[in-house]
Amino acid sequence: MKRVWVGAVAALTMAVPAAAAPTTVTVTGSVMSGIDAGGQFGVAGASLAGRPFSAIFTIDQAAGSSLNETATSSYLAGMGAASPISAVLTIGSASYRFAGSQNGLVRVTDAAGNGGTDSAMFFVDDTDLSQQPNDNTLLSLGFDTLRNVLSSPGFTAVAVSDLNLSDNAKGVVKIANRDATTGAFGTPTVADLSIETIRATVTSPVPEPATWAMMVAGFAMAGVALRRRRVDARVRFA
């Protein structure tokens, strides 16, 4: 009966497969300069300078994406369906979503204490180059500083609250404006961004239906093993 119990425990353990938890990275700051040519953030043609912004990146390793981790850096990237990152950018009170449908990457390096720099980069690109727009539709934010501001190279552990332009803490947003009727691309919405804070939050993954099924099966097997042990104990006692 001991072997049955061990087998049930093994089945229960297998019912909860390991999975990388998605990470949310929130970046805040202000717009240094920019024109809202397409009106994505309010009135078309209006200046975006001086407005606060927040960018919320969702990082989730996708099938086919490339993950490279060393003692001082983490790099995760992918193209198309393998893009591991998307973002929602809010300027003022309006938001625009970047799906990362063409390209996406996140890179974090913790090397300021080893003669290098501490850096982070979050990039999403929705440009279909086959359509040859006059500018990309992308969001790129990051910093590169000699200050030792990171405690680890993992992109799930970034938490910096006092970034400034001397840390090269900047970003850019470009949204190619395409006329749905003619297919022609007009003047893009552009903005240069100054970053003040970056903070990562790890999200607890929700089990897939198949995972729930495996968990139920594992508990069931454990229950059967327990009942058999009780019956076996009664027989030997009698």
Image (spheres, rainbow, N blue to C red):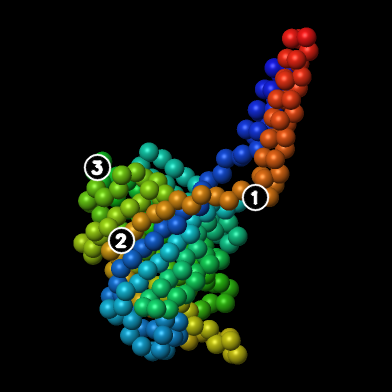
> Do we see residue 33 in this rendering?
no
Q: How many marks?
A: 3
Distance from the alpha carbon under mark 3 to that under mark 2: 21 Å
Look at label 1 and name its amino acid. Glu
Report helix, strand or loop for mark 1. Answer: loop
Query: Badge 2 is on which residue?
Result: 197
Relative vertical location of residue 147 with respect to residue 15 in this rendering, above or below: below
> Do we see residue 193 in this rendering?
yes
In the rendered structure, are the residues bearing label 1 and label 2 in contact, judged by CB atoms less than 8 Å apart? no
Alpha-carbon neighbours of circle 1 within 10 Å: few (<14), some, or many (≥20)?
Answer: few
Distance from the alpha carbon under mark 1 to that under mark 3: 41 Å
Choose the circle earlier in sequence order: 3 or 2. 3
- Nearest the viewer among 112 and 203 is 203
- Image quadrant for the N terminus? top right
Report helix, strand or loop for mark 2. Answer: strand
Query: Badge 3 is on which residue?
Result: 113
Q: Image check: 115 left or right of 193?
A: left
Look at label 3 and name its amino acid. Gly
* Residue at image location 30% in from the left, 48% down from the top: 150
* Residue at image location 41% in from the left, 58% down from the top: 25
Choose the circle earlier in sequence order: 1 or 3. 3
Relative vertical location of residue 19 with respect to residue 55 in this rendering, above or below: above
* Residue at image location 61% in from the left, 39% down from the top: 17
Query: Badge 1 is on which residue?
Result: 208
- Nearest the viewer among 58 and 153 is 58
Tell me the mark number nearer the camera, choosing from 3 and 2: 2
Alpha-carbon neighbours of circle 2 within 10 Å: few (<14), some, or many (≥20)?
Answer: some
* Residue at image location 45% in from the left, 75% down from the top: 95
